[in-house]
Image: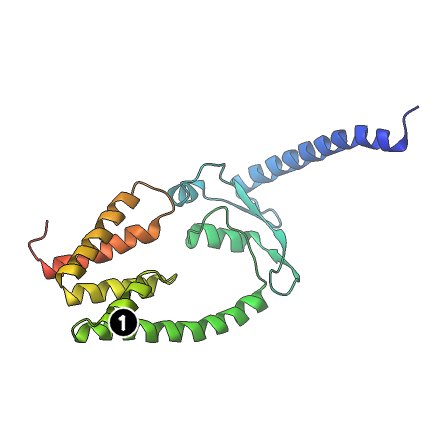
Amino acid sequence: MATNRQRTEKVTPVRRRRAIELATDVARRDVSALKAGRPVPRMVLANRDVLTLHNKLPGDLPTYYMNRLFTCHDCGKEEIWTAREQRWWFEVLHRSIRSVALRCSACRKARRGLVGVGANLLREQCARLRSLAERPPSPAALAEIKDALNSKWWGVRIAAIQTLGRWGGAEEVARLEAIVATGRAARKCWGRDWEVLAGRVADKALRRLFPDRS
């Protein structure tokens, strides 16, 4: 005679399959209603043409967005990422379709306040890097630029590249050429956006130095 646990283990896969089939059937009817222009609570039809343009990774794109529950990464509060917010995130801001909501609105506002302070510090650092170009490069200035090129902040790296271009010495030109070459190679690879951007900034700096550059 089968025990309760054995019966549960046998029934659970059946229940799971039925639940999936029911959810799929409901979603199919809801999507049909959305496509016909009828509103469906907590759901919004996705524009797959827009999603295709900005999502090159393999995987299925959604036909619709549905309200999602998530737990805030900072405060632990349970929040809802609405279907309309998802559409704005993916189709207007063109974020990766694999991204998810992490923070509630209150924690996002608090974080923006902290980021604002950090942004001021970054602006000051970028201004200092550009000011280095107003005088010949010293060993200390070269070391500072080298550190800036390895910064995690794109703006800091760009300021460093621009300073190299304004110095325009043989060593600086060689470094810019290397950045350009790396950027061109990165165009063939996914996930190397920084190298591509750096290559373009370096190429622009070189064109200012050498207007006839091809």
- Determine which quarter of the picture holds residue 76: bottom right
For badge 1, the amino acid type reads Leu
Please state the horizontal and vertical placement of residue 201, each as a whole percent of the image: 23, 58
Q: Residue at x 23, y 75 (%)?
A: 131
Residue extending farthest to the front is 139
Mark 1 lies on residue: 129
Q: Is 204 situated above or below 41?
A: below
Q: Residue at x 60, y 46 (%)?
A: 40
Q: Residue at x 48, y 46 (%)?
A: 97
- Determine which quarter of the picture holds residue 157: bottom left
Please state the horizontal and vertical placement of residue 155, each as a whole percent of the image: 33, 64
Left or right of 154? Residue 46 is right
Residue extending farthest to the left is 212
Task: Give the position of the N terminus as an image quadrant.
Answer: top right
Q: Is 156 situated above or below 47?
A: below
Residue extending farthest to the right is 1
